[in-house]
Image: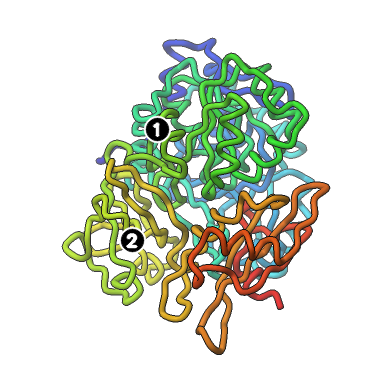
Amino acid sequence: MSPGYGDPIRWWRRFSPERIALVDRNADDRLTYADLDRRSDRWLDVLDRQIGIRRGDRLALLMGNRREFAELFFACVRLGVALVPLNWRLSAKELGVILADATPALVIGEGTFRALAEEAERAAGVSLRWLDVEDDAIGMLEGAPSGFTSPCARVDGEDAAMVIYTSGSTGRPKGAVLPHRQLLYNAIATTIAWELGSSDVAPITTPFFHTGGWHVFATPLWLRGGSVVVMDQFDTATFLGELADAKCTVALTVPTQLMMLAESPDWGRKIPSLRWLISGGAPCPPPLAAKVRSAGYELREGYGLTECGPNCFAISGKEAAERPGSVGRPVPFLEMRLAETREAEAGALRGAETGRTGAGDGQPGELLLRGPQVFSGYLNAPELTAEVMTRDGWLKTGDLAVQDESGSYRICGRRKEMFISGGENVFPGEVEAALTDCPGVAEVVVVGVADSLWGEVGRAFVVPRRDATVSNEEVLAHARARLGRYKVPKSVVVLTDMPRLGSGKPDRRALAEMR
């Protein structure tokens, strides 16, 4: 049997039972490792003895961030059941597609999402077994034996721990199967490379239906004996207050949150416990990163994806400031290489023998990853798995990266987002980076659109800053002063709000379809 994530809270219960594992701000509750261990065992009794969930089943959760996510996760680890966190931001039709694919033995959710689940059932033509996490579960948990300590299932590292569905920006939602082995090696590599210890505390604002909610900080810190603070929503005042009140030492943000924080009246508030922030989910615009650092916060940039990691790189605060946009070097256990973009476009990638390593030549290539942090594949979709995995184990991320002379990497954008204008490759991320410091611009996304003369040209979608106005010509003039002519967008569209996927990232497909 290969090693898996295991059951670290059982270990910490034995050796440091009063250590705080989780703080749930929504319920104003604090769980020690002993509390979390006991509650996980009670859920195990509910799932196993009272309901009849068996090893190999899948359990779906439809609820906001709350302590029960952690309790049920460890109950599933002990039972050998794969957890499927569901995105409650989806439409009933979208959710129905996922439920039909995942075929969960049970859905546990909040009553507020019951109507959504029922509509999804009808849309997909499936029948769900539903358990309300509050009304139905209370009596069942009270009926679980007091003091019961479950034996842990003999889970192999290749067994599925979770199935997390991607946002589906390419169409069909894909259920990424995360084995126990992936969780274990991501947790170990993260605690080593990011120097996380048992004294670290991290707020969790990313929804638990995303890998970032679980595996950027939560599962690594539980392995190490640290603490997480669960928050159901993000607003600047609450977030900054929580950083101070809970004495948080590290925190994950996305660029949109950083933009909101930078406009907050509490921006720049000193938080003595905070060691650093990490920005992920999308490249952080250099002007925004500079603004964060000028306020006295140490900012690092991260990179990862559901299918690998998600913590793939490590960088020090000093190097992050010296090399804007860099995500650093690979974490332990993870191999990386860059493949020629033309080779990738031709679908010719077969493995490490093909293409180049990209060692400091400054040319973008598709980022390939290999190691124990790589997922098992997509649920019920071997053809989709084959599209992203080479025969010798390399994951084709679809992301473009550049390696500089120091060995550090910078993410340029998605390979599929690249467009060709008049025979020249244009990378939207490069254009966006040039426009983020345009006066009055809060956010910008560039997509390629068809053009009868050039084949494709860039179109910039711009959201102005609060109380600011931006003209099309101002944006274009700013681009002309900083970019080669073929990279300058041919049109600008000013938006009030940026359309987004469930992950919070801009919905580039929706933008490309705008007329």
Q: In the drawing, does residue 247 fall left or right of residue 424? A: right
Q: In the drawing, does residue 385 fall left or right of residue 30? A: left
Eyeballing the image, is 187 above or below 489?
above
Furthest-bottom residue in view?
A: 452
> Which residue: 23% across, 64% down?
391
Eyeballing the image, is 101 above or below 157?
below
Q: How many marks?
A: 2
Circle 2 SS class: strand
Q: Residue 458, located in which quarter of the rendered image?
A: bottom right
What is the distance, in whole Å, between disc 2 and disc 1 at their CAs?
Answer: 22 Å
Q: Residue 469, located in which quarter of the rendered image?
A: bottom right
Disc 1: which residue: 319
> Which residue: 74% across, 60% down?
118
Circle 1 SS class: helix
Q: Amino acid at mark 1?
A: Glu
Locate residue 154, reporting x and y percent.
34, 37
> Which residue: 47% across, 26% down?
222
Q: In the drawing, does residue 381 fall left or right of residue 299? A: left
In the rendered image, the quadrant that contains the N terminus is top left
Locate residue 87, reporting x and y percent.
64, 52
Q: Are marks 2 and 1 in contact (CB under 8 Å)?
A: no
Q: Amino acid at mark 2?
A: Gly
Locate residue 31, reporting x and y percent.
61, 19
Locate residue 315, reporting x and y percent.
39, 34
Disc 2: which residue: 365
